[in-house]
Image (tube, rainbow, N blue to C red):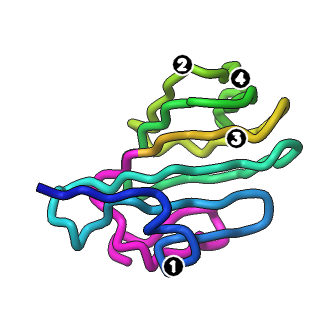
Amino acid sequence: MIVKHLNQILGTAAHATGEGWESRRILLADDGLGYSLHDTLVKEGSALELEYKNHIETNYCIAGEGEVEEVSTGRVWPLSEGSVYVLNAHERHILRALKGDLRLVCVFTPALSGREVHDASGSYAAEG
């Protein structure tokens, strides 16, 4: 059994931050589950353009209001508490936090190692 608390993640190497966002990486590849689990904050007013070429990501919104835009089509979906979106076809997208910090519970498969950094395209390498 694995039991962790967010307080154990904050301020460690598993607590990644960047301009307008932070990812508290709770479960990672070393946990041996085949997926990773993240508590992510996107700061109000931030817009992140991302494309996960090597991972599938599921995002469940638990706070804030925002939107996700599929770059190839320009289609935009509103996000609020209770919304879920899945990047099942590695879609290039723009995530915007519009009202309050957007808080997402994110699951990546394959699991992230926790050492990844976004490359110029907003993606992570296949292995961290």
Could you say which is closer to the camera, residue 34 or residue 12?
A: 12
Could you say which is closer to the camera, residue 28 or residue 68?
A: 28
Amino acid residing under circle 3: Leu
* Residue highlighted by disc 1: 12
Image quadrant where one finds the C terminus: bottom left
How far apart in space, not on screen, are marks 2 and 4 (Cα)?
17 Å
Mark 1 crowdedness (10 Å alpha carbons): few <14, some 14-19, many ≥20: few
Amino acid residing under circle 2: Gly
How far apart in space, not on screen, are marks 1 and 4 (Cα)?
34 Å
N-terminal of the pair, mark 2 or mark 1, is: 1
* Residue highlighted by disc 4: 76
How far apart in space, not on screen, are marks 3 and 4 (Cα)?
10 Å
Residue 10 among those drawn in magenta: no
N-terminal of the pair, mark 3 or mark 1, is: 1
Q: State the extent of the magenta-drawn residues as a range.
A: 107-128
Determine whether 33 is above or below 65 in the image: below
Query: Do labels 1 and 4 touch, CB within 8 Å?
Result: no
Q: Residue at left 54%, top 70%?
A: 15
Residue 3 image-quadrant placement: bottom left
Residue 127 among those drawn in magenta: yes
**Labels 2, 4: front one:** 2
Please indicate whether residue 35 sits to the left or right of residue 54 in the image: left
Q: Residue at left 76%, top 41%?
A: 101
* Residue highlighted by disc 2: 82
**Labels 1, 4: front one:** 1
Q: Is mark 2 on a helix, strand or loop?
A: loop
**Labels 3, 2: front one:** 2
